[in-house]
Image: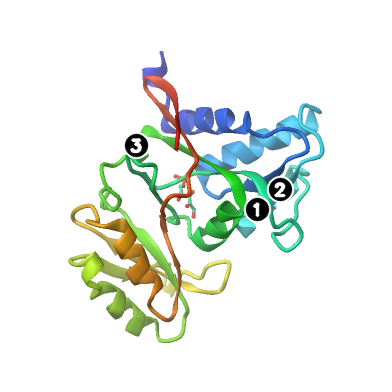
C-alpha cells in the first residue's frame, strides 16, 4: 500500500507524526518548506478543533508566518519567546549521524536561530533526503552572505580548501539575485562528492567575513522522522 504514496503524502506522514511532539502550552518553532507546511497546517487544525491549546509559535520565514497567520496560529518572535520546547522543520539532506543540510528554500538563517533556541528539533523528511554524506545529493548547499562585494565572497567560498572542488553560484530569482528575508544573498555550493569533513567546512565557511550563515546544521537534530515506502521511521539522536 504505502509503496504507492506520493512524495507529498510521505512528507505529510512525517509532518503529522512530528506534530505529535507538540503538546498544549508549548512554545513551538515552525519550519519552512513544503514538508514543514504540512506540519503548520496540522497544528492549525489541532488548534481549531481544540485538541491543542495555549501554544505559541515562532515562524522561520515570512512565508511560514503568512501561512500560520492564515490559520490563526498565535505567533511570537525570539525576542518575545527566546526559549522553545520544540521546533519542526524539513531538510534537504540527512546523513546517518542526523546532521543535515537545510536552506534550499532560502530560510536557513532564521531556521538555524529558531532551531538552536529549541530544546528539541524534530526534522521531517521523506526518504529521498537521505544521503551517505552531506553534499552527496549534488544539489545546493546554501551559504547566506551579505550583498556587499558578493563576488569577492563567492570566490573566497569556492577557494576554501575545506570545500575543494565545489562549484559556487549566486542564487537567482529570474534575472535578479535571490534576496533572503534578511536582505542577504545566497551562494549555492555544489559538490561532486560528499564533503569530507562537514565540521571543518562549517567552520571555514563561518570564518569568512561577510558570511552570515550556512546550510550545514550539525549536531542540531534531536529527532528525525523519515517517511518512506516501508512506513514512518523515528530516529533519535
Ligand atoms: O531548509 C529549508 C528551507 O530553507 C527546507 O526545510 C528544506 O529546503 C526542505 O524543503 P522541502 O520540505 O520543501 O523539501
Instruction: Indicate which label's residue lies in the foreground, 3 or 2.
Output: 2
Which residue has dot 3 on it?
A: 128
Which residue has dot 1 on it?
A: 59
Whichever of callouts 3 and 1 sits on the residue coming sooner in the sequence is: 1
Crowd around label 2: few <14 · some 14–19 · many ≥20 (10 Å): many
Whichever of callouts 3 and 2 sits on the residue coming sooner in the sequence is: 2
Crowd around label 3: few <14 · some 14–19 · many ≥20 (10 Å): some
User: At which x and y percent is residue 34?
Assistant: 51, 43
Disc 1, SS:
strand
Answer with left or right where residue 16 lies relative to residue 177.
Answer: right
Q: Are marks 1 and 2 in contact (CB under 8 Å)?
A: yes
Residue 207 found in image quarter: bottom left
Which residue has dot 2 on it?
A: 57
Disc 2, SS:
strand
Q: Are marks 3 and 2 in contact (CB under 8 Å)?
A: no
Residue at 61 percent across and 49 percent down: it is: 118
User: In the depicted view, which residue is nearer to us: 48 or 121?
Assistant: 121
Amino acid at each position: 500500500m504505502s509503496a504507492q504514496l506520493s512524495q507529498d503524502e510521505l512528507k505529510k506522514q512525517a509532518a503529522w507524526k512530528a506534530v505529535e511532539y507538540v503538546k498544549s502550552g508549548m512554545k513551538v518553532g515552525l519550519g519552512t518548506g513544503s514538508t514543514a507546511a504540512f506540519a503548520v497546517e496540522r497544528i492549525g487544525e489541532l488548534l481549531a478543533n481544540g485538541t491543542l491549546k495555549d501554544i505559541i509559535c515562532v515562524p522561520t520565514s515570512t512565508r511560514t508566518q503568512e501561512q500560520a497567520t492564515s490559520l490563526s496560529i498565535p505567533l511570537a518572535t525570539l525576542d518575545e519567546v527566546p526559549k522553545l520546547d520544540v521546533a519542526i522543520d524539513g531538510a534537504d539532506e540527512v546523513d546517518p549521524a542526523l546532521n543535515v543540510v537545510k536552506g534550499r528554500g532560502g530560510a536557513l538563517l532564521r531556521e538555524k536561530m529558531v532551531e538552536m533556541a529549541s530544546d528539541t528539533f524534530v526534522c521531517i523528511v521523506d526518504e529521498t533526503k537521505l544521503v551517505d554524506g552531506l553534499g552527496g545529493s549534488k544539489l545546493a548547499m546554501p551559504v547566506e552572505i551579505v550583498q556587499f562585494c558578493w563576488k569577492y565572497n563567492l570566490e573566497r567560498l569556492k577557494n576554501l580548501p575545506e570545500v575543494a572542488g565545489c562549484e559556487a553560484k549566486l542564487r537567482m530569482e529570474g534575472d535578479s539575485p535571490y534576496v533572503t528575508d534578511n536582505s542577504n544573498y545566497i551562494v549555492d555550493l555544489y559538490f561532486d562528492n560528499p564533503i569530507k569533513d562537514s565540521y571543518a567546512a562549517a567552520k571555514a565557511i563561518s570564518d569568512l567575513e561577510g558570511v552570515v550563515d550556512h546550510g550545514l546544521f550539525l549536531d542540531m537534530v534531536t529527532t528525525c522522522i523519515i517517511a518512506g515506502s516501508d512506513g514512518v521511521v523515528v530516529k533519535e539522536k
